[in-house]
Image: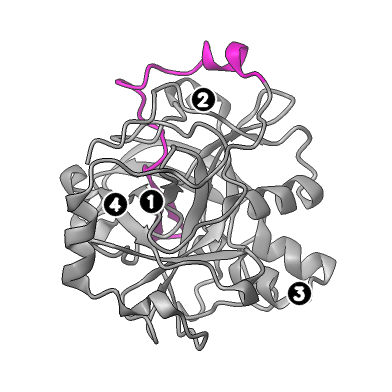
């Protein structure tokens, strides 16, 4: 996970850790502020997914690239029927500083790099391989190639797509473990106090699934970020290895992907890149025809 020190003041930064935990667990009814973007019918594709209960390649699966471990966010498809799993573009960085935050200037591994899907990884072992794929798109590589200069795009567009090997596609289900969904794509960002849901899988936690589900509260979007970034707190913050993780809004729409760990003025907060913007950028520049988010086969159920 990258670290970033924000200098933008936010009035919601007064949320203390204990108050946050109380707020997260006290309310059982949350009015979702996110709205779902229109998504094409996926009935035919859904019939081909592996059953959620037995699928092994899903959002939240561990992904290893040249020894570096990150976490899958969502599943995507294209018009040819190919299947992709997303994670953070910085997970395919060239091994430089973990604090690199500018995707327009940071070097990355080339397209075609092998990525493996694994379970049970920890600090001593990469765990068991479940399948593999190849790096098919990186926002960082693309930004460099097309000469992107917008500072928010460079700072927060942190999405890469791994094309699942044909022999492993039958192991895939797009549902986010524990929570279900996604039900669509969020298009209106987050407001201070909005509930969010995630599923991380860092090897620092030895891949223990009981520690993977996370619930959090948005700190409110800053206008200066242009809608590209959503700062938030979770009861247990995302740590290195959780990078790329999916975040869902209160109605189960895909709101973002975990990118950075904040240091100041919001210590131990996380920043997630806006998925609607990240995906739109990929649709324009990746060369992948018909690229779209795959909806979950399991209903979204925010039981906490």
Q: Which is closer to the viewer, label 3 or label 2? A: 3
Q: Total number of numbered labels?
A: 4
Residues rendered magenta in the picture? 41-70
Residue 124 visible in the displayed image:
no
120 shown above or below 165: below
Q: Which residue is mark 2?
A: 169
Neighbours of disc 2 within 10 Å: few (<14), some (14-19), many (20+) = many
In terms of depth relative to the viewer, which is nearer, 7 or 75? 7
Kindly identify which residue carries mark 4.
215
The residue indicated by pointer 1 is: 196
Does 147 lie within the magenta span? no
- For the point 22% across and 59% down, the residue is 23
Q: Tell me residue 120's x, y (percent).
A: 23, 45
- Marks 1 and 4, the one that precedes in the sequence: 1
Decide which of 247, 217 is in the foreground and name it.
217
The residue where tag 3 is placed is 150
Quadrant assignment, res 82: top right
Are circles 1 and 4 on residues that touch, CB within 8 Å?
yes
Q: Is residue 8 left or right of residue 32?
A: right
Badge 3 or badge 2: first in the primary sequence: 3
Q: Which is in the foreground here, disc 2 or disc 1?
A: 1
**Between marks 2 and 1, how big is the CA–CA gap?**
29 Å
Please tell me which of labels 2 and 1 falls first in the chain.
2
Regarding mark 4 in the picture, which secondary structure is present there?
strand
Secondary structure of the residue carrying numbered label 1: strand
Q: Residue at x 48, y 60 (%)?
A: 191
């Amino acid at each position: 996970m990258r670290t970033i020190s924000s200098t933008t003041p936010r009035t919601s930064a007064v949320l203390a850790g204990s108050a946050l935990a109380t707020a997260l667990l006290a309310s059982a009814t949350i009015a979702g502020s996110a709205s779902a973007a229109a998504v094409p019918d996926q009935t035919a594709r859904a019939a081909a997914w592996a059953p959620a209960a037995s699928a092994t390649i899903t959002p939240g699966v561990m992904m290893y690239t040249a020894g570096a471990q990150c976490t899958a966010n969502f599943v995507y498809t294209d018009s040819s029927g190919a299947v992709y799993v997303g994670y953070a573009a910085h997970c395919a960085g060239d091994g430089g500083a973990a604090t690199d935050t500018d995707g327009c200037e940071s070097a990355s591994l080339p397209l075609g790099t092998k990525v493996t899907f694994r379970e049970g990884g920890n600090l001593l072992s990469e765990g068991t391989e479940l399948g593999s794929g190849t790096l098919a798109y990186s926002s960082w590589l693309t930004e460099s190639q097309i000469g992107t200069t917008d500072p928010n795009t460079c700072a927060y567009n942190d999405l890469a797509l791994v094309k699942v090997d044909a022999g492993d596609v039958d192991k895939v289900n797009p549902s986010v473990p524990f929570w279900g969904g996604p039900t669509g794509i969020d298009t209106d960002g987050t407001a201070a106090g909005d509930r969010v849901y995630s599923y991380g899988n860092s090897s620092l936690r030895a891949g223990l699934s009981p520690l993977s589900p996370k619930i959090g509260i948005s700190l409110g979007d800053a206008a200066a970020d242009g809608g590209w970034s959503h700062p938030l707190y979770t009861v247990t913050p995302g740590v290195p290895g959780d990078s790329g993780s999916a975040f869902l809004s209160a109605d189960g729409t895909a709101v973002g992907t975990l990118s950075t760990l904040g240091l100041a003025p919001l210590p131990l907060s996380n920043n997630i890149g806006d998925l609607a913007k990240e995906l739109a950028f990929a649709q324009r520049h990746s060369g992948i025809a018909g690229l779209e988010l795959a909806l979950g086969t399991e209903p979204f159920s925010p039981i906490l």
